[in-house]
Image (cartoon, grey):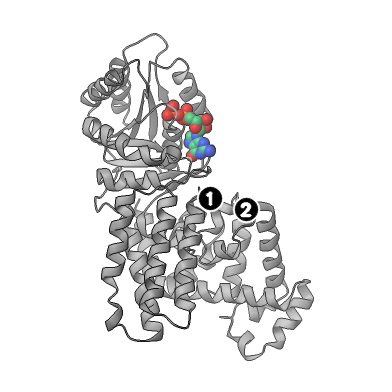
C-alpha cells in the first residue's frame, strides 16, 4: 500500500528536521506541513489531517524546549503520538474466549474481500488452538458458497451452507445452531455484500444479526476505497453497528488513508489487515506497532509473534529478548528467518530501521541485500557473533577483515552494525515487556 511511501515521507520530514542545524520554529512548521500534505495525498480525510497538525503543534511548545537531543525527542514523540491517535479509536475490540461459542459476523460490500478474509481469520484462530468453523449466509451471489467451500476445504475448516435454501437468515441460523451444538468456539458467518436495492442489503444484515446474535460484527473494507470509506462505513455502522474493522488489500497500490479515516468516523478499531491473496496474508493490527512500522521503527513484537506462529526456531533470541539482550548472532538468525518467511517487502517493516535501509528496493534486490548481510555475519568469529557489537568500535580493523572475508565492503559491515545497534537498543527497552507478552501468548 502506498502507506509505505507515506511512512517514508513522514519519516524523511522528521529526520530532516531533527538532523538540521537550525532547528527553529519555521523549520518545525514546515515539517508539520509536509506531514499534513503526505497524509492528505494518502487519502486521509482533510479534516482529520488539520486536527493532527494542530495537535502536533500544540503538544510541542517550541519556545520552552531545551536544546539538542531533548528537542528532537519531544518532536519525534509528538509526531508518533498523534499518528497513533489517528488510528486508535480508544475502543477495545471484542476478544474471543476459549471454551465458549464466539459468533463473528462479517459485513461489507461485495468484492471487499469478505469471503477470503473469513477463511483467513478462521485459519488464524485455528492456528491458535480454537475449534473454528465457517457459515456461508450469502445466498444472493451465485458461487459464493462454492468459493467459501473451496477455501475452507483447503484450510481444513468445517463449513456450513446450502445450494437450495434461498433465505440467508435461515442458513445463518441453522449453521450457527449446528456448530454451537457441536461445541465450536469460533463460528464465522459470511454475509452477502450486494442486493438489487441497497436497502434490501441493510435489511438482510439486520435480520441475520437478530437471528445469530453475533458476539462481534466485523466490517471488511477494501484499502482502495479512498475518500468514500467514511460515508460507507458510517452507513454500515448505523445499520449493523459493527465493533471492528478489517482492511483488505493493503498490499495493493491504493493510498489506504481513506480506510484509516473510517476508524475516526466510526470510532471503531481496525483488528486485522489483509496483506495478500494467500491464506496466511493476514496481520493483526494495533495502533502503536502500525505507526512504529510506518515510521521505520519496526515492530519487534509483531515479528516475534509471526515467527512463533510459523514455528521457526527462536529459542535463543526469545530468551535474549526477554533479558533485554540482543547479540550480533541474534540479528543473523532474524535475517535468515526473514528470508524463510515470504515476501521481504512485508517482513522488512517489522525490523527497526530495515525498511528504510531497503527503501525503494524490490524483493529480489532486498533479498540480495539480506544475503550479503548474512555473509557478513558468517565471516565473524563466534566471539564476535555472541558479542554486543562493541568490539568493532574498539577495534575497527575487524571490520576490514570481515568485509574482505565476506566479499562485501566496510561500508556494508558498518551498516549491519548500525542495524544491530538499533535493534539491541529496542531489545533493551522491550526487556521486561517481552516476558509479559510471552506469558500472555502462553495463556491464549
Ligand atoms: P467478497 O465479495 O467481499 O466476499 O470478496 P472476495 O473474498 O471474493 O474477494 C474479492 C477479491 O479480492 C478476490 O479476488 C480476493 O482474492 C481479493 N482479495 C481479498 N483480500 C485481499 C488482500 O488482502 N489482498 C489482495 N491482493 N487481494 C485480496
Residue extending furthest bottom? Answer: 394
Q: Distance of mark 2 from mark 1, alpha carbons?
A: 10 Å
Name the side, left or right, on which 148 lies relative to 365.
left
Q: Residue beneath label 2, please?
A: 340
The picture places residue 166, in percent across and down from the top left corner, at 35, 10
Of residue 364 and residue 333, the one placed in the foreground of this image is 364
Residue at image point 41% right, 70% down: 430
What is the count of numbered marks? 2
Residue 199 sits in which quadrant? top left
Q: Where is residue 23? Give x, y as percent.
A: 41, 80
Mark 1 residue element: loop
Q: Nearer the viewer, residue 413 or 213?
A: 413
Label 1: few (<14), some (14–19) or many (≥20) C-alpha neighbours in 10 Å? few
| Residue marked by disc 1 | 310
Q: Position of residue 223 (x, y in %)?
A: 44, 41
The one nearer the camera, 434 or 44, is: 44
Amino acid at each position: 500500500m502506498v502507506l509505505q511511501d507515506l511512512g517514508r515521507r513522514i519519516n524523511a520530514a522528521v529526520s530532516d528536521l531533527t538532523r538540521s542545524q537550525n532547528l527553529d520554529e519555521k523549520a518545525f512548521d514546515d515539517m508539520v506541513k509536509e506531514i499534513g500534505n503526505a497524509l492528505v495525498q494518502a487519502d486521509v480525510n482533510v479534516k482529520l489531517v488539520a486536527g493532527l497538525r494542530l495537535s502536533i503543534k500544540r503538544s510541542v511548545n517550541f519556545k520552552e524546549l531545551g536544546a539538542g537531543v531533548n528537542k528532537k525527542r519531544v518532536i519525534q514523540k509528538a509526531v508518533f503520538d498523534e499518528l497513533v491517535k489517528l488510528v486508535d479509536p480508544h475502543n477495545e475490540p471484542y476478544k474471543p474466549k476459549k471454551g465458549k461459542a464466539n459468533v463473528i459476523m462479517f459485513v461489507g460490500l461485495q468484492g471487499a474481500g469478505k469471503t477470503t478474509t473469513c477463511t483467513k481469520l478462521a485459519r488464524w484462530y485455528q492456528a491458535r488452538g480454537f475449534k473454528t468453523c465457517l457459515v456461508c449466509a450469502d445466498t444472493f451471489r451465485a458461487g459464493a458458497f462454492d468459493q467459501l467451500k473451496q477455501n475452507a476445504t483447503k484450510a481444513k475448516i468445517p463449513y456450513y451452507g446450502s445450494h437450495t435454501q434461498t433465505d440467508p437468515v435461515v442458513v445463518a441460523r441453522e449453521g450457527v445452531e449446528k456448530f454451537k451444538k457441536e461445541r465450536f468456539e469460533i463460528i464465522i458467518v459470511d454475509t452477502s455484500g450486494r442486493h438489487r436495492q441497497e436497502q434490501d442489503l441493510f435489511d438482510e444484515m439486520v435480520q441475520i444479526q437478530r437471528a445469530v446474535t453475533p458476539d462481534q460484527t466485523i466490517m471488511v473494507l477494501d484499502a482502495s476505497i479512498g475518500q468514500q470509506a467514511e460515508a460507507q462505513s458510517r452507513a454500515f455502522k448505523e445499520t449493523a453497528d459493527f465493533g471492528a474493522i478489517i482492511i483488505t488489500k493493503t498490499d495493493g497500490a491504493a493510498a489506504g488513508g481513506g480506510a484509516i479515516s473510517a476508524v475516526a468516523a466510526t470510532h471503531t478499531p481496525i483488528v486485522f489487515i489483509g496483506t495478500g491473496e494467500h491464506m496466511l496474508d493476514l496481520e493483526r493490527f494495533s495502533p502503536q506497532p502500525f505507526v512504529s512500522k510506518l515510521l521505520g521503527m519496526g515492530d519487534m513484537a509483531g515479528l516475534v509473534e509471526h515467527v512463533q506462529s510459523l514455528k521457526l526456531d527462536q529459542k535463543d533470541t526469545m530468551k535474549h529478548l526477554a533479558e533485554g539482550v540482543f547479540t550480533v548472532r541474534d540479528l543473523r538468525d532474524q535475517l535468515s528467518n526473514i528470508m524463510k518467511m515470504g515476501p521481504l517487502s512485508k517482513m522488512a517493516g517489522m525490523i527497526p530501521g530495515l525498511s528504510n535501509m531497503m527503501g525503494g528496493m524490490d524483493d529480489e534486490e532486498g533479498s540480495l541485500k539480506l544475503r550479503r548481510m548474512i555473509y557478513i555475519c558468517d565471516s565473524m568469529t563466534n566471539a564476535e557473533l555472541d558479542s554486543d557489537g562493541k568490539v568493532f568500535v574498539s577495534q575497527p580493523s575487524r571490520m576490514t577483515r570481515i568485509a574482505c572475508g565476506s566479499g562485501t565492503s566496510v561500508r556494508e559491515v558498518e551498516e549491519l552494525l548500525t542495524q544491530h545497534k538499533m535493534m539491541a537498543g529496542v531489545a533493551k527497552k522491550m526487556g521486561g515487556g517481552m516476558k509479559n507478552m510471552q506469558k500472555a501468548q502462553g495463556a491464549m
